[in-house]
Image (cartoon, grey):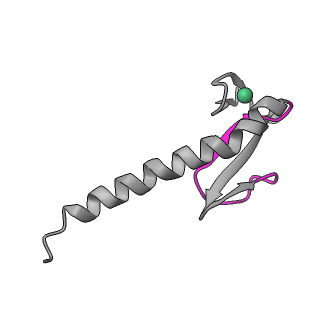
């Protein structure tokens, strides 16, 4: 069983009914051949709703990451 969870609707499904994508820089890259060695996310391949909500999700995700790295930078005592 190769089940993954859709990041949008949180539904569990087999990888063949999901689409893999990665976040590279500011872009959503669809990893159709499962070849990109980066952390992969999944969403429902057949759902327009999940696809439409993807950009918003990615923006939110990026913001979280940005805040985190900013916080780490503040721990630096190099003044
Ligand atoms: Zn979904």
Q: In front here: 32 or 57?
A: 57
Total marks drawn? 0
Question: Is 42 left, or right, of 18 in this rendering?
Answer: left
Furthest-top residue in this view? 11
Whether residue 16 is situated above or below residue 30 in the rendered picture: above
Observer able to see residue 15: no
Q: Main secondary structure of the magenta part?
A: loop
Asked where in the image residue 7 lies, by quadrant, the reply is: top right
Q: Where does the image place residue 27, in percent across and percent down from the top left?
A: 67, 60
Q: Specify the segment rendered in magenta.
A: 31-46
Question: Is 26 left, or right, of 72 in this rendering?
Answer: right
Looking at the rendering, in which quadrant would you find the C terminus? bottom left
Whether residue 6 is situated above or below residue 67 in the rendered picture: above
> Residue drawn 76% across and 53% down?
30
Looking at the rendering, in which quadrant would you find the N terminus? top right
Whether residue 43 is situated above or below residue 38 in the rendered picture: above
> Where on the image, by quarter, is ligand 1?
top right
Q: Where does the image place residue 53, in percent across and percent down from the top left?
A: 71, 36
Whether residue 69 is situated above or below residue 10 in the rendered picture: below
> Residue drawn 61% across and 47% down?
58
Q: In front here: 20 or 25?
A: 25
Residue 34 included in the magenta stretch of the image: yes
Q: Where does the image place residue 50, in percent across and percent down from the top left?
A: 75, 32
> Residue drawn 43% across and 57% down?
66
Residue 77 included in the magenta stretch of the image: no
Question: Is 23 left, or right, of 65 in this rendering?
Answer: right
Q: Where does the image place residue 14, in percent across and percent down from the top left?
A: 75, 28
């Amino acid at each position: 069983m190769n089940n993954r969870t859709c990041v949008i609707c949180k539904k569990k499904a087999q990888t063949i009914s999901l689409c893999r994508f990665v976040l590279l820089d500011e872009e959503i890259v669809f990893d159709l051949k499962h070849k990109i060695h980066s952390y992969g996310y999944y969403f429902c391949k057949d759902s327009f709703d999940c696809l439409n909500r993807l950009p918003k999700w990615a923006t939110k995700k990026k913001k979280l990451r940005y805040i985190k790295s900013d916080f780490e930078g503040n721990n630096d005592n190099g003044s």
